[in-house]
Amino acid sequence: MKIHLVPAAAGLALLAGVGVATADQVIVTPEQQTVVRQYVERHPLASISLLGVELNVGSTLPDTVELHEVPDVEYRYVVVDDRTVLVDPGTRRIVQVID
């Protein structure tokens, strides 16, 4: 009986993990993307370099990085290694990398 419970428990844990991952996912709407792209083009920033920080969705930026506001969008932006990234100001996590 124990042999059958282990795979079932593992399957439930996997499903729970998938649920957590999707609940944590941030979606930037097409309208927000358009607003951000237009704003960034009109308000370019100098690119900064961050050693040891990967520019991936979910990566956290250090507190030393200044985040810049985009009007009418809840996220902030910064240019790192010539790539514009959108950041959740509350968690400082990257929500989108704009190429």
Image (cartoon, helix red, strand yellow):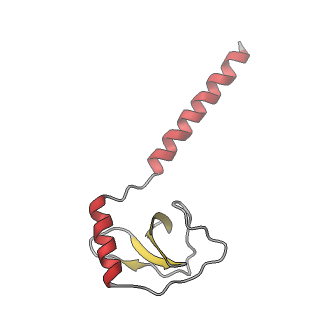
- Relative vertical location of residue 41 with respect to residue 34 in this rendering, above or below: below
Front position in the image: 38 or 14: 38
Residue extending farthest right: 3
- Which residue does the image show at 51% across and 60% down from the upper left? 57
The image quadrant of residue 31 is bottom left
User: In this orientation, which residue lies closer to the viewer: 53 or 98?
Assistant: 98
Closer to us: 20 or 38: 38
Tell me if I can see residue 13 in this picture.
yes
Q: As drawn, which residue projects farthest toward the front? A: 99
At 58% from the left and 75% from the top, the residue drawn is 62
Specify the quadrant that holds the N terminus. Answer: top right
Q: How many marks?
A: 0
- x and y percentages locating residue 64 in the rendered image: 56, 81
Q: Residue furthest bottom?
A: 46
Q: Residue at x 64, y 29 (%)?
A: 10
The answer to whether residue 91 is left or right of residue 37 is: right
Q: Estimate the x, y position of residue 26 in percent, counting from the top left.
A: 42, 55
Residue 81: image x %, image y %? 55, 78
In the picture, which quadrant includes the C terminus?
Answer: bottom left
Residue 88 visible? The answer is no
| Residue 2 pos. (x, y %) | 72, 16
Q: Residue at x 50, y 79 (%)?
A: 82
